[in-house]
Amino acid sequence: MRSRRGVAVLTVALVGQSLIATPSFAQDGPRVETIATGLDNPRGIDVADDGTVYVAEAGPGGDDHCVTIEHDGESDEVCMGATATVSAVPAGGAVAPVVTGLPSLMLGEGEFLGAADVAVADDGSLFVAVGLGGDSDLRDSIAEDWSPADMLGTVQHFEGGALSEVADLAQWVAEEDPHAGQPSTQGPQGQPSNDSNPNGLLTTSDGDLLAVDAGGNSVVEIEPATGEIALRAHLEDRTAAAPPFLGLPPGTQIPMQPVPTNLAEDPDGDVVVGDLTGFPFPVGGANVWLVDGSDGPELVEEGFTNIMDVVYLDGELYVLELARNGLLSGDFEGALVRVRADGTRTSLLRDLLVAPGGVAAGPDGMLYITNDSIGEPGSGSVIRFDPSLAADQAIRSACPPLEVPGTSLSDIAGTTHEEAITCTAWHGLFRGFADGTFRPGAEISRGQVATTVARLVRATGADLPDGSGGRFTDVDGTTHAMAINALEEAGIVSGFSDGTFRPRDMISRAQVVSILVAAYEYTTDSTLPAGGDAFDDIGGVHAANIEAAAARGWVRGTAPRTFSPRADISRGQMASTLARVAADLVDGEFLTLPE
C-alpha cells in the first residue's frame, strides 16, 4: 500500500514523528487563534456558510485488520481501523466528530492514511475524499476481509447521517490510466501505473464537484448523481536535479511527478491546482496551474515548495506549503504565502506552521488551517488566522497587511523582518539595492539611518529644513548629505566633537534609539514620556531614551533585561523599529497611510 505518490506516505516516510510538534499561538492574540486541538492527522478543511469548520482527519489507524504488503522488494505491515473521521467545529463551539467509521491505515512506522479532504455542498451535505496510495486491485483484496477498505480511493457523500459512495477514483485510474505514456518514477518510461490517491475536493460556484487524484496526477470532474468521472486535467511528469546522495553525476536530471494536491476557485470562476512535487521534492519546484479543461494545465505561479493547498480570499491567492525548506531537509516548518495580483508575495505564519495540511477561507474573512497534519495522533489542530492583522502588534496601525502591497525584493521572503520591510517600503522610508535585494541581515550605516529618518519626518508633513546647510566636515558630496544636514539643523542628530558625522560608520542600537526619539519629539512637538527600568546594561547619554522607547514598544531587548546598546543594528531590525515608530505616529494622527 505504500506509494511514492501518496502525499501522506511521502512525507512521514522521510522523517520520524518526533520532529512534529504543535506550537503555541497565544502570543499573537486575535491574529492567530487555535480553535481545535487533539485531532488525528488533520488534512483538508472547508468552512460552511454558517461558519462551521469541517476537518478531514486521516485518523490513527487501528488493529481491526493487519496485512503484510510486498512492494518494490520491501515488506510493510499495514494495520487498519475504522477511525478516520470528519469533525465539525461550530462557530464558537467545541470540536465534534460528524462523519465516523472511515478507514484509517497505519503504514509501517507512523504513516497514516484515511480521510484526505472534505467539501461542503450547496445544500450543506458533505463530500469526503478517502485516500489510498495504491491500486484498486490491492484495495479490493483487502476489502474481502475488512469491508471498510471498500471506501479507500473513493469520494463519499454524507447526508442525513449516512454515507454513500459518489465515485470510485481508484477504479477509474485503473481503467483510464490518465498518465499512460508518461515517464514514471515507479517504472520504465511509458509503463502504466494504477496508483490512486484521492487528496483534494472542490465544490465550485457553478455547483461542480472536482477532485484531485495525487496518484493519478489528475484533476477530474464528478457527477454526483451518477458517479460519472471525466478528466479535467492531467499534470505531466517533469524532471529535477538528482540529489547528491543518489551518487549520480552533478546536474543529472531524473523524472519527477507533479503530485497535485488541492484546488481553489479564483474570483473569475477559474480553477487552479497546486502540486506537491514527487521525489526529489526540489525546493522552489512546486507550481500552481490553471485547469480549465480545454488546452491542458496552464502555469500561473511557480517557485513554491511542497504545496499542500491553495485558496483565494478577497481576490488574493494564498498558497500553503507543507515544508518550506523541502521534504528532504527533514524540516517540517510550513508557510502560508500570499500572492498579490501583481505577483508579489509575502510569506506568512512562518514560525507557527508545522506540517500544515489544508487551508480554507471562511465567510468571516478568516483563513482556517490544519496544523501538524502528519504527526503523532492527537497532536493535530486547527488555527484561525486573520490576514488583515500584522504579526507585530506594535506596527499594526501603520502596516495593515491587506493594504500594504508586495515588493519585488528578492531576499526578504520568510525572514523575521519581512513584514516591516515591506511596510516601510510602502511608506517610502526604505529602499532596496539596484540588484533587487534588501539585505536584511546587513549592518546599516549612520548615513543610511539619517536618510530613512528624514523620510519619516517629511512623510508626516513636518517642516524639516532643506539640508542645504550643515556644519559637518565629512558629509558634503555623500549620498546622505542633505538628510544628515537637515536632521542636524532640526536638532535631531548631532555629530562628534571633531566636527564629523562619520556617515559611513555603522550605527549602534543605542544611537538609533536616540535619533528616533528626537525625530518623534520634533515631529509631534512633544516630549516622549519617561520609561521604566527595563534593562540592566544601559547607561550614559542614551539610557533615558532607550527606556522611553522600550516603554513605547519601539524597541526590545536582545535577552531579558539586556539591550546590548553598543551592538550594531541590521537593516531588517531598523525596518522593524522604524515601522513601530511609524505606527505610533499613525495612532497620534501625525502620519497617514499611503494611498
Image: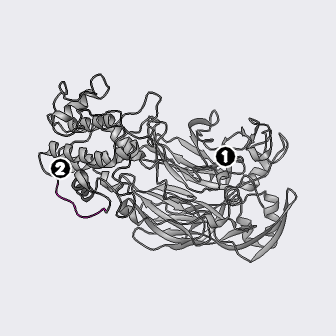
In the image, taking residue 185 as reference, residue 440 lies left or right, namely: left
How far from the left and from the top, in percent, is residue 10? 70, 56
- As drawn, 252 above or below 434: below
Q: Residue 493 versus residue 420: which sits nearer the camera?
A: 493
Residue occupied by mark 2: 588
Label 1 – label 2 distance at C-alpha? 49 Å
Locate the C terminus and report the quarter of the image it occupies.
top left
Among the 4 quarters of the image, the one containing residue 500: top left
Q: What range of the chain is rendered magenta?
A: 528-535
The residue shown at (41%, 47%) is 417
In the image, taking residue 183 as reference, residue 392 lies left or right, namely: left
**Which color scheme did the rendering employ for the protein?**
one colour
Question: How crowded is the residue under tag 1: few (<14 C-alpha within 10 Å), some, or many (20+)?
Answer: many
Q: Nearer the viewer, mark 1 or mark 2?
A: 2
- As drawn, 533 above or below 576: below
Q: Residue 207 versus residue 383: which sits nearer the camera?
A: 383
Q: Residue 112 versus residue 470: which sits nearer the camera?
A: 470
Locate the N terminus and report the quarter of the image it occupies.
bottom right
| Marks 1,2: beta carbons within 8 A | no
For the residue marked with disc 2, what is the amino acid?
Gly
How far from the left and from the top, in percent, is residue 190? 83, 40
The residue shown at (74%, 77%) is 63
Among the 4 quarters of the image, the one containing residue 78: bottom right
The residue shown at (68%, 44%) is 258
Question: How crowded is the residue under tag 2: few (<14 C-alpha within 10 Å), some, or many (20+)?
Answer: few
Q: Is residue 532 magenta?
A: yes
**Earlier sequence position, callout 1 versus callout 2:** 1
Under tag 2, what secondary structure?
loop
Residue occupied by mark 1: 277
